[in-house]
Image (cartoon, rainbow, N blue to C red):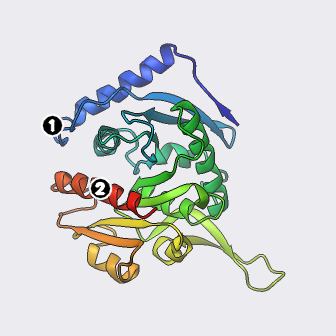
Amino acid sequence: MISTFNPNARTCLIGAALLAALAAACAHAVPLRRPVPQPFVRTVTLYGHQLEVHLATLGSGREPLLVFATGDGGWRGYDLDTYRHLVSWGYPVAGFSAPEYIKYLRGEDETTTPVRLATDYKLMVELARRELRLAADTPVILVGVSRGAGLSVVAAGQRLLQPELAGVLAVALTREEEHVRFRRRRSSTATGESLMLQTYEYLPNLEAVPLEVIQSTNDNYVTAAEARELFGRDSEHRRLIPIESKNHSFSDAREELYAAMEQSLTWLRRRN
C-alpha cells in the first residue's frame, strides 16, 4: 500500500531538517557539480508504518532511476552528501534511511527475508517512477552505502526485482547483513534453521545483474584486500574497485569515492 503527503507544514519541516543536516556537514562535504533541488518526501506503507522516500531529479527523464539506501547514519552527514551528489549527476533518485527501514521490521530481532526485502524495494521503485513521472520501463540501479549496500545486494539477488534492474553499486559492503535471515533446508520436509545472510556468499544470486563494489583499503569491517578474496576475480559484468582510505566511511578520500561512484554508474549503464 502506498500513500503520499500533500504539500503541507510537515513536508516543509522535513525539507528544513534535511537542509539543516546538510549545513552541518558542509565543512567536510565535497562541492557539488551543480545545485540540486530540495528533495520532496513521499511515503510507502511497510509493515503498518510509513517509510519516508526522498525524491529529487535534475535529469531529462532518460537516465536510470537510482534507489539509494543510506548507512546506519541515516539522513545526515556523508549519507546526505552522497544522496545530493547522485542527484547532481543528473539521475532521478529515490532515497530511504536504512535505520528507519529496519526499525519497522517485524519481530524483536528486527529481521526480514530476501523475498520480503525485494518486495519492499519493488514498492519503492513503483512509487518513485510515479512521483518522478518516469516511464514504466525506466531501468533501476540500486545504490547503497554500508548497511544500505548490504540491503541493495540482497534485494538485487531476488528474481522478483531483477527484471527492473540495470545494476547495483555497493559502497563499503560488509561481510554480513544481520537484519536479513533465511532458512536452510535440512530435508525436503524440514523447515531448517534461520541463518544470518552472508553478503559475499550471496553474490552468485546476482549473476544476471551487473555489480560494482567500492571498498576502502582500510575498511574497519572488510578491507579491500579481504573483499577481493571474498569477491573473486572481476568479470565483464562484475568489478571490485579499491580506494586508498583510512576507514569504512572514506573520510579522507571522499573526492576519490565520488569520482569512482560516478564512473561506476556510467559503467553499469553500459552493461545493458
Q: Residue 45 placed where, x, y %?
A: 65, 37
Residue at (18% x, 43% y) in the render: 30
Q: Is residue 122 left or right of residue 256?
A: right
| Residue highlighted by disc 2 | 261
Q: Residue 74 placed where, x, y %?
A: 40, 43
Residue 111 in sight from this viewpoint: no
For marks 1 and 2, the one nearer the N-term is 1
Residue 87 in sight from this viewpoint: yes
| Residue highlighted by disc 1 | 27
Q: Residue 210 placed where, x, y %?
A: 45, 66
Q: Is residue 111 left or right of residue 239?
A: right
Q: Quadrant of residue 225?
A: bottom left
User: For the residues marked 1 and 2, what is the alpha-carbon distance in whole angstroms?
Assistant: 21 Å
Name the amino acid, label 1: Ala
Name the amino acid, label 2: Met
Q: Is residue 192 left or right of residue 21?
A: right
